[in-house]
Image (cartoon, rainbow, N blue to C red):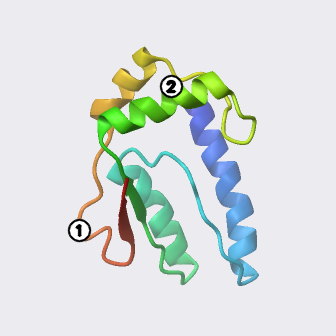
Amino acid sequence: MIERVNRCYEQIWEVSKQILVLDGNVVLDLGFTTKEQRDVFVNRAKELGINAEIHYLDAPKDIRKKRIKKRNLEKDPSVYAFEVTDMMFNFMEPKFEVPSQEELKHGCTVNA
């Protein structure tokens, strides 16, 4: 993983952990491209005695590309941080690992 992304994930986890130990709820809307990335956070939650849920948002490639192009055009500050180019999209596309049924047993799939 890119080092700066790793640093962000660590900082996000530290804040999340503070909320969780105070009996709060946390939703981590991060990429979690691979099972390995998802497992890191699921295992961290387990260490705190918390059962993590994975909610997988499943959308076909053409719909995802269309949404990215729309977001790139609109540049709504509530969802737009930087432009996602076709090259970026095509680079990440084959890296994504669909969550297994085992990963989703305490979660769900939402179809777009």
| Rendering coords of residue 33 (x, y %) | 39, 44
**82 versus 67 height, above or below:** above
For the residue labelled by badge 2, is the local secondary structure a helix, a strand or a loop?
A: helix
* Rendered image quadrant of residue 23: bottom right
Element type at mark 1: loop
Q: Amino acid at mark 1?
A: Gln
Vertically, is 58 above or below 23? above
Residue 72 visible in this rendered orientation of the protein: yes
Q: What amino acid type is highlighted by mark number 2?
A: Lys
Question: Residue drawn 32% across and 33% down?
Answer: 62
**How far is the residue under mark 2 from the one under mark 1?**
31 Å
Q: Position of residue 103 (x, y in %)?
A: 31, 67
Where residue 86 appears, x then y in whole percent? 42, 17
Residue matched to label 1: 101
Q: Could you tell me which residue is drawn at 59 percent across and 31 percent down?
A: 71
Q: Residues within 10 Å of mark 1 (few under 14, many from 20)?
A: few
Is residue 11 shown left or right of residue 65?
Answer: right
Query: Looking at the image, which residue is at 71% across and 34% down?
Result: 76
Tell me residue 56's x, y (percent): 39, 59
Label whose residue precedes the other's in the sequence (2 or 1): 2
> Mark 2: few, some, or many residues within 10 Å (few <14, many ≥20)?
some
Residue that badge 2 annotates: 69
Residue 105 located left or right of residue 75: left
